[in-house]
Image (cartoon, helix red, strand yellow):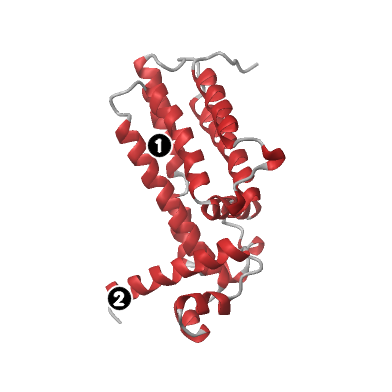
Amino acid sequence: MNTAKKNLKEAKLISAAEEVFAKMGFKNAKMEDIAAAAGITKVTLYSYFQSKENLYMAVTYKAVQSLIDKYYETIDQYKAEPGIESSTALVKCFMDFCEDNFLYSEALLDYFALIRSSANGEDESKMPESLKESIYFQKIKNIHNLPFKLAAKELERGQADGSISPDLDVMVNTLHAWSIVIGYAKIISASGENKSPIFNINLEKIKSLNLQLTRSALQGHFKLS
């Protein structure tokens, strides 16, 4: 099979896996469920993906790539606006991304939990055997810091144009914004397809509060002690 046909087949299998993972969750999903959703045998599925973990990493890689694409689109859309506008828009972009696909937000949370527990993926003793040889895991590691870098660059642009406080610690605020969105992602992940968050609070209210806090921080209204 040539590379183009192989890539197309893998893409179809990944899409089938997304459907199953979204419906059953990663832990409950089985390879035979994914094979059935794809209309192939389990043996054929294993010839493309040697483990459920590797297939989940393929879904996660797709999620990271999609998020990066959204970031670039947002940055391009706000390139003529002050840096505070593009920076705030990136936070909204990430929250929108989590809302649009709870499976992707869940996959990202799982990935960063794995990274945290395995010394940034370098301590293989802390990793499942099935992931040590996963090409998709390696691909994600190569790009997972790009959203941070893109956000930090927009913060620096905002400092240069005067819309963001010059006293702002760029990396601290980049990570702070990330932590805000991760909390939002956890709410989305817990809600699943029901889209009914904890305590039945409207997601738009949470999003609006997050954006207000982000903008206030970037304007220097909060000071580090």
Residue found at x 45% / y 15%? 166
Pointer 1 local density, CA inside 10 Å: few below 14, some 14–19, many at least 20: some
Instruction: Classify 221 as above or below 143.
Output: above
Residue found at x 43% / y 28%? 87
Residue under pointer 1 = 150
| Res. 133 mark | none
Residue under pointer 2 = 5
Horizontal and vertical percent for residue 150? 40, 37
Amino acid type, callout 2: Lys
Amino acid type, callout 1: Leu
Instruction: Classify 79 as above or below 17.
Output: above
Horizontal and vertical percent for residue 216? 53, 18
The secondary element bearing badge 2 is classed as helix
Mark 1 or 2: the one toward you: 2
Instruction: Classify 80 as above or below 126.
Output: above
Question: How many numbered dots are placed on residues in this image?
Answer: 2
